[in-house]
Image (cartoon, rainbow, N blue to C red):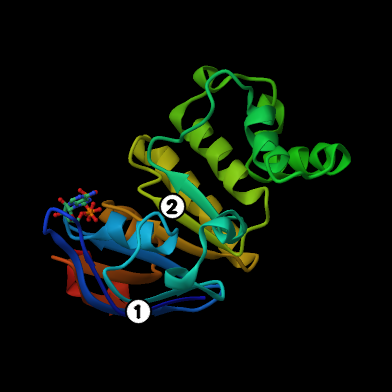
Amino acid sequence: MISFSNVSKEYPNGTHALKDVNLFIDKGEFVFVVGASGAGKSTLVKLITREEKPTSGKVMVNGYDLGALKRRQIPKFRRTVGMVFQDFRLIPNMNVYDNVAFALRVTNVSFRDIRRRVPYILGLVGLASKARSMPDQLSGGEQQRVALARALVNNPSLIIADEPTGNIDPELSFEIVDLLNEINRCGTTVIMVTHEHDLVAKFNRRVITLDSGVIASDRNDWRSSDESE
Ligand SMILES: Nc1ncnc2c1ncn2[C@@H]1O[C@H](COP(=O)(O)OP(=O)(O)OP(=O)(O)O)[C@@H](O)[C@H]1O
């Protein structure tokens, strides 16, 4: 569950990236966040992951009041959120298996559980046969699936993907969103920032449109709207 109550974000240089935003995303929803460059999409994501703090207002995510979160509580909170980025952010000198296992090792999961969980998650994203490959031996779509596996391996209740298909061919982009869709069907909340209107139209989910730091529209019936043309 995510809620924004009268949230504004002003960066130190005076840019008002978000202005008095009110928003509620329930557990289990799939939400696209769209909007022009500079509209405030990444700022919204950074407030949800507590990379940034609001200048005013209250952000609640998975039961945590992020404004009141102590520094030492941040890692525990972040384990409830899986993050996927446009540039994949894989560790280049680790193979696929280790990239995913690493996310578990840093949280002190036992060797036995890692050996059980990593192959399961790699199977889920269709990469069981690539476990020993290095990231630079994979296509963009495959690298993003590894990143997705890494985001999923801690069993987060929320996946937040900031332009996950931005560096991927259009055919493979569909596969990534399809995977996110499957993950969502199993109960995980998914928030995906994108510029790709084709994908948004194809999957027909809730769409939040940001414009100059405010929510310009928030709708569940994207396909029937004129904006999908
Ligand atoms: N660290 C920062 N310091 C100052 N201004 C910032 C910072 N980060 C973002 N901004 C500004 O805040 C506004 C919103 O930026 P944000 O990155 O949230 O937009 P966006 O919708 O994600 O854009 P894009 O689609 O280009 O990634 C922009 O005017 C941007 O220049």
Pick whichever, 76 or 44, lies toward us: 76
Position of 229 compared to 75: left or right?
Answer: left
**Circle 1 sits in a helix, a strand or a loop, which is it?**
strand
Above or below residue 149? Residue 59 is below
Residue 201 figure quarter: bottom left
Precedes in sequence: disc 1 or disc 2: 1
Res 161 label: 2
Above or below residue 220? Residue 142 is above
Above or below residue 3? Residue 211 is above
Q: Amino acid at mark 2?
A: Ala
**Circle 2 sits in a helix, a strand or a loop, which is it?**
strand
Location of the C terminus by quadrant is bottom left
Residue 21 figure quarter: bottom left
Position of 16 compared to 184: left or right?
Answer: left
Q: Residues within 10 Å of mark 1 (few under 14, many from 20)?
A: some
User: In the image, what residue occupies the spot 62% across and 50% down?
Assistant: 152
Residue 201 can be seen, yes or no = no
Residue 31 can be seen, yes or no = yes
Position of 216 compared to 44: left or right?
Answer: left
Above or below residue 196? Residue 64 is below
Pick whichever, 52 or 82, lies toward us: 52
Q: Whole-percent x and y of residue 20?
A: 22, 78
Q: Which residue is mark 1?
A: 23
Res 44 label: none
Residue 187 figure quarter: bottom right
Q: Is mark 1 within 8 Å of ligand 1?
A: no
Q: Whole-percent x and y of residue 13?
A: 13, 53
